[in-house]
Amino acid sequence: MALTLYYNPASFFSQRARLAVEEKDVAYRSHIISHPSGEAIEPWYMRMQPNGTVPALKHGEIIKTDSKDIILYLDEITPDAPKFYPDSSIHGSDRVAYLTDLMQTISVEQITFGSLCYRQYTQDCKLPNRFDVKYAKQSFDAMGDEMRKLAEKHPDLRESYMAKIKVHEGRDLTNKENFLVALKECDSIMGEIEEELAQKWNGKFDNFTDSDPWLCCNHFTVADIYLATLLHRFVLAGQVKRMWGDGKRPYLAAYYARVQQRKSFQRACGSANNLYLSVLLPKLKHQIRKAFPRLVGFSVFAASLGLAVYMQYKGYPSWWPNNLKPKF
């Protein structure tokens, strides 16, 4: 029975899960969830994934709703493939556990939203320019209001919506001090990973072969999934110079160049930092489907793609409805 992966291409945790699925080379069906359209809190999705988050993996009656659980489950159903979480018989397995736990402490959401709101701490940031603290708070409030409406409309999901509202409103992702602390802590962790790579690669920065080790082991592990997606997120958030640019950490730079050549990474993350493809296009597709439910399949995709390209270069046509204009 094929897997179904529910994800959003721009979602950091979705990228972890999708990279893991691609690494295992298992058959799966993609179902893209549009975050800006609020699809993750729609009742049909909340019934499957009560946290209202992505990713989610469905395999028959089994549903995994956290990227770490998804990666563990993929190890379970592919017993003959190299393990993301290698056992103690594999050299470097102890470092996999240590470095994965270390990277798990990085507040990726804090760094992402902080980079959105405080551009003076970024360089070549690829995130939307019009996003600031005021807009972020308005967006958070609007999402909270929408979830309250849905909780009243769907009593069977009230408990799930209220739990998500509590988590949603308990976060302070636009706090400047928290952002700067997160950056400092992450910078320190990247320094430790640079030392790890220096020991493994011992002066090698290019011309890698399949026999060359990755971060911890000779094969690609969960630690590599975490590091690859982290580095890719730093590119999006404009944090390359701080973390490894301008010769600061040459092994990290070499690692990122190497992982970009990996076919699984290209399929899972190749378009993730192109927000027209990873955010705008899924949103347009979802909104058009809701507005015109009879339009499905390729016609929706083609129309959405055409509109996305048109609006990127020409702006909105005069007849385009206001409620279908994307707001980042």
Image: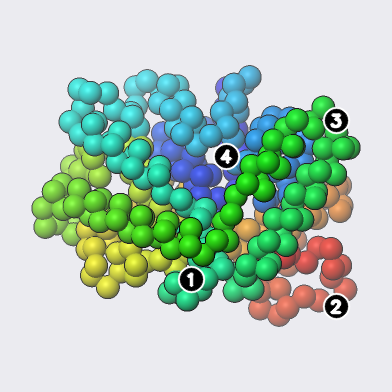
The residue shown at (63%, 46%) is 170
Instruction: Please state which amino acid type lies under the numbered disc 2.
Output: Ser
Instruction: Specify the farthest residue to the bottom.
Output: 314
Q: CA distance from mark 1 to mark 4?
A: 25 Å
Q: Disc 4 designates what residue?
A: 55
Instruction: Please state which amino acid type lies under the numbered disc 1.
Output: Cys
Q: CA distance from mark 2 to mark 1?
A: 30 Å
Which mark sits nearer the N-terminus, 4 or 3?
Answer: 4
Label 4 neighbour load within 10 Å: few <14, some 14-19, many 20+: many
Q: Disc 2 designates what residue?
A: 318
Residue 54 visible to an observer of this rendering: yes
Q: Quadrant of the N terminus?
A: top right
Query: Percent x, y for residue 130?
Result: 64, 73
Quadrant for residue 78, please give it: top left
Instruction: Please state which amino acid type lies under the numbered disc 4.
Output: Pro
Front tag of 3 and 1: 3
The residue shown at (20%, 43%) is 213
The residue shown at (48%, 71%) is 125
Label number found at residue 155: 3
Query: Percent x, y for residue 107?
Result: 46, 50
Which mark sits nearer the N-terminus, 3 or 2?
Answer: 3
Q: CA distance from mark 3 to mark 2?
A: 40 Å
Label 1 neighbour load within 10 Å: few <14, some 14-19, many 20+: some
Front tag of 4 and 2: 4
Q: How many marks?
A: 4
Q: Disc 1 designates what residue?
A: 125
